[in-house]
Amino acid sequence: FLCSGCSDYKHASATSGEIRVEADESVFRVIKIIADSFQQTYTQSKIHLRSVEAREAIVNFINDSATTIVSARELNEEELDALKKYSIEYRGYKCAFDAVAVIGHKGNPQKELRLSELDSIFSGTTTRWGKKGRAVAVAVCGVNSSVNEVFKNRILKAKSFTPNAMKFSTSDSVVRFVENNPNAIGIVGIHGIRGREEHLTIFSLGQPGERPDSTQEEGKMYSPHQAYIYKKYYPLWRNVYIYSREIGLVASGFIAYVTGIYGQQKFLQEGLVPATQPVRLVETTRKQIQ
């Protein structure tokens, strides 16, 4: 929307004017990079960007206190029902593919985890690394986090996290805790580990006897590599959406930028996968793609 009293932006269009955007904390940094690029390109635009957990952004969207939001998960049935109940008109656009990364301390000798092991660790059935190993310290994001919701739906089948799980308000806090605790394991969005990969163990995931398609080996483990996210071989892939109640003005210009070639290139450069532009996979060996 156009902010009243802002004389620098009184001639609103798709590339000029002001807009307030709430972005899912787990993808906030990459959305900020794109928003900054948009404003540098279109100097008469101003994006007021705020980082919140996905659930908060969606509630604010339904309540009309946020008219454009970015979420790294789909709207759930409860949220869709609320939008329908109040006859809220909106548009949603898939803008990127992302993933939930499972991370451990750099010194952790274990580099792969079965999905059943993840279930046991994060639900609290397994409390040690190995039968006589050290106690596992589980770190997760806040209760309204999209990371938590995706993980619960895919791994825990909507069960609760172990009561011993430590909850952090930001992905960065989860990463710092895991970096500094040899017994730790945590979950964050891919962009949360951007530039810190050398300081962490990033677990490859899979399940014995299963394969994502007929071209792959049974029981193969997959890292959250861009190619494996795009092919959906990595089991904790997820979609990133931008939703808007604003049909015109600068909101439409920003959405076009996010879903267009420039925004999609930024996603690619930042470790996510473009959702609206062609993706080319390059085979580097017979068993590895990039």
Image (cartoon, grey):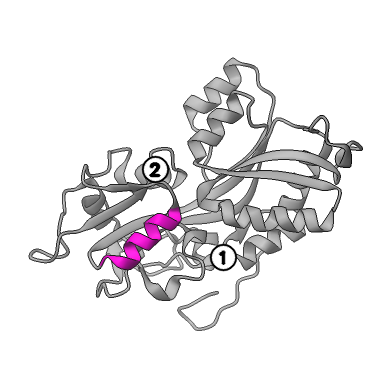
Q: Amino acid at mark 1?
A: Gly
- By secondary structure, the bulk of the magenta-drawn segment is best described as helix
Return the mark for residue 271: 1
| Sequence-earlier tag: 1 or 2 | 2
The answer to whether residue 26 is magenta is no
Return the mark for residue 20: none
The answer to whether residue 178 is magenta is yes
Question: How far from the left and from the top, in percent, is residue 141?
Answer: 39, 47
Which sits in the foreground, 31 or 219? Answer: 31
In the image, residue 5 above or below residue 255:
above
Mark 1 element type:
loop
Question: How far from the left and from the top, in percent, is residue 134?
Answer: 14, 64
Q: In which quadrant of the rendered view does residue 269 lie?
A: bottom right
Which span of residues is magenta-colored? 171-181
**Quadrant (top left, top right, bottom left, bottom right) of the C terminus:** bottom right
Please state if 60 lies on the left or on the right of 158 as rendered: right
Q: Amino acid at mark 2?
A: Gly
The answer to whether residue 13 shows anywhere in this view is: no
Residue at x 9% of width, y 63% of height: 131
Return the mark for residue 142: 2
In the image, residue 205 above or below residue 126:
below
Mark 2 element type:
loop
Please state if 127 lies on the left or on the right of 158 as rendered: left
**Quadrant (top left, top right, bottom left, bottom right) of the N terminus:** top right
Residue at x 55% of width, y 36% of height: 57
Q: In which quadrant of the rendered view does residue 32 lie?
A: bottom right
